[in-house]
Structures are given as C-alpha cells and as structure tokens.
Image (tube, rainbow, N blue to C red):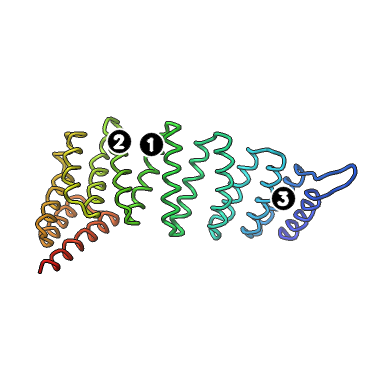
C-alpha cells in the first residue's frame, strides 16, 4: 500500500514540477512537498533506494526555489536513505549538500558532511577519497576554531595516508597535530602517541636519520617525552635499524607490546619496517 501511495505522489509531483500553461507554471514548492511525502512512503515499505531518489527530486525543487537551506537538508536526508546499501549514491547526495553549505559560508556544517563522506568512503575501501575528505573536513573545522573536531579528522587522514604508504604526508599531519596539542592540557597526554606514529612513518619511508633528528625536536617540544616508554622504544628500534639487527628489532617490539599493547595500525607499520631490515640484511649477504 505504501509503495502504491508513493508512486501516486511521485506522479502528482512530476506534473506539478513540469506543468506549463498561459496562467500556470511549475509549482516547485508543492512538488517538493509531494516528492518528500513519496520518499517517506517508500521508507515505510523499506524501499530505501527509491526513498533516496524521491528525496533527491525534492532537493532539486528546493534549488529551483533558491532555498539553499532546504536543499542541503534534503540532500542530507537522501544520503541517509542511500547510506546502508548504496554508498556511492549517498556520497553523491552529501557532495551536493557540501557544495551548497560551503557556498553559503556554512563551513562547520560542510565539515560535518565532508567527514561523513570520509566515513562512507573508508567503509567502501576507497581510502584515497576518504583521506581527502577527512583532511578537507579537518581544515574547515580548524578554520571554525573547532580544534578537537579538526584533530580527530586530521588523525584519520594521517592514519589513512600511512596505510596508503604516503608516509611523508602522514608525518606532516601527525607532527602538526602533536605541535598543536603540546600546550593544551586536554590533549597533552596524547602527544607521545602522535610522536610515536610520526616516527614510525619516518622509519617506514625509510629514513632512520630523519627519525633521529625528529626525536630531538620532539624532546624540545615536549621535554616529558624523553621519559616515556614510547621514546625509549623508538630509540631502541632506530638503533636496531641502523645496525640491521632484525632479531633485536623483533625483541624490542615484543617487549613494548607486552607493556603498551600495539594496535593493528602500528603493528602493520612495524612489520613493514622489519621487512626493510630483512631485505637490507639479505642484500648484504
């Protein structure tokens, strides 16, 4: 019943959106309302693709009326209908919303939707697009002085950059977050982890000399870093790398893991670094 009602509403909306005559033209406002009602009826019958498509038509009616606020909200609503099973359509709808929001100078709202594009892209394993979206969202949040939200997105972008082996960009992002967090009492405790991640990315380049120089800067930025397990661990594995000692590297990683459990991201980078040591050792023999 809901599907039949939805189709009936679509037909009425189409007529209102396209009607022509001497005394009557398109009625975009009424058509938009009917498209929205049709979308809701499709949702009741769990036809989410059709619900999203009807809401996209409603958004277009808002654009015809130059009602940017309603258009953006309708694009966002359409994306929610598409989200579970049709991620590309969801991303497309969100991109339309972002374009409207940034044109209207609503950058915080644009950032929230760009972040959602990042999440959907990451879930779809499009890591390049996810990284770009997280970084764009972070920049807009930063411009709006939403530092915590900006850092959250920068961290996601940095982590993805490393996964994509764009280590130089990952280093820039991790170090930038760390530098901005040192003097903040709420984020200072996380600085040692940001330094650890940045240094691991340097070692994955591979650039042990650059990592050694970076360690000096980290200690200057945050003198307390020198007393952390993270600092001791980095100094140990940098020495192992410079000595081409894969066994010592493995032992130091295992020891650190027993005290500070390594997550999958760090484990992956450490395995990549170890592989480089083994390859150098094989070349030497």
Q: Residue at x 64, y 60 (%)?
A: 47
* Mark before the other along the chain sequence, 3 or 1: 3
Q: Position of residue 156 (x, y in %)?
A: 37, 48
Marks 2 & 3, CB-CB < 8 Å contact: no
In the visual, does 103 lie left or right of 247?
A: right
Q: Are marks 1 and 2 in contact (CB under 8 Å)?
A: yes
Could you say which is closer to the camera, residue 53 or residue 154? Answer: 154
Question: How many marks overall?
Answer: 3
Label 3, label 1: how far apart the Cα atoms are: 38 Å
Left or right, residue 15 beside residue 179: right
The residue that label 3 is drawn on is: 35
Q: Give the SS element for disc 2.
A: loop
For label 1, the SS is helix
Q: Earlier in the sequence, mark 2 or mark 3?
A: 3
Q: CA distance from mark 2 to mark 3?
A: 46 Å
Instruction: From the viewer's perspective, tell me whether residue 179 is left or right of residue 250.
Output: right
Which residue is denoted by mark 1 in the rendering? Answer: 148
Q: Position of residue 124 (x, y in %)?
A: 46, 59
Mark 1 or mark 2: name the one nearer the start of the chain: 1
Q: Residues within 10 Å of mark 1 (few under 14, many from 20)?
A: some
| Disc marking residue 79 | none
Say which residue label 2 marks. Answer: 187
Q: Residue at x 14, y 60 (%)?
A: 250
Counting from the top left corner in percent of width and height, residue 41 is at: 69, 54
Which residue is drawn at the image coordinates 52% and 38% (left, top)?
109
């Amino acid at each position: 019943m809901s599907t039949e009602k939805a189709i009936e509403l679509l037909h009425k909306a189409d007529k209102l959106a396209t009607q022509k005559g001497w005394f009557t033209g398109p009625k975009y406002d009424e058509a938009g309302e009917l498209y929205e009602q049709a979308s809701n009826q499709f949702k009741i019958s769990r036809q989410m693709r059709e619900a999203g498509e009807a809401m996209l038509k409603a958004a277009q009616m808002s654009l015809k009326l130059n009602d940017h606020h309603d258009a953006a909200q309708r694009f966002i609503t359409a994306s929610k209908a598409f989200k579970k099973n049709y991620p590309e359509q969801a991303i497309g709808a969100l991109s339309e919303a972002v374009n409207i929001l940034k044109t209207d100078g609503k950058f915080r709202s644009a950032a929230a939707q760009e972040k959602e594009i990042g999440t959907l892209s990451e879930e779809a394993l499009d890591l390049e697009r996810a990284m770009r979206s997280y970084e764009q969202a972070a920049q807009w949040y930063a411009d709006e002085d939403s530092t915590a939200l900006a850092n959250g997105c920068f961290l996601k972008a940095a982590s993805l950059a490393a996964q994509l082996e764009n280590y130089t960009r990952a280093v820039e992002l991790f170090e930038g977050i760390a530098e901005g967090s040192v003097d903040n009492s709420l984020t200072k405790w996380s600085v040692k982890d940001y330094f650890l991640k940045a240094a691991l990315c340097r070692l994955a380049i591979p650039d042990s000399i650059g990592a050694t120089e970076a360690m000096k800067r980290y200690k200057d930025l945050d003198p307390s870093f020198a007393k952390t397990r993270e600092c001791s661990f980095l100094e140990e594995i940098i020495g192992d790398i410079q000595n081409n000692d894969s066994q010592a590297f493995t032992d130091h990683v295992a020891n650190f893991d027993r005290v500070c459990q390594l997550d999958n991201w760090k484990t992956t980078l450490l395995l990549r670094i170890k592989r480089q040591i083994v390859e150098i050792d094989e070349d030497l023999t």
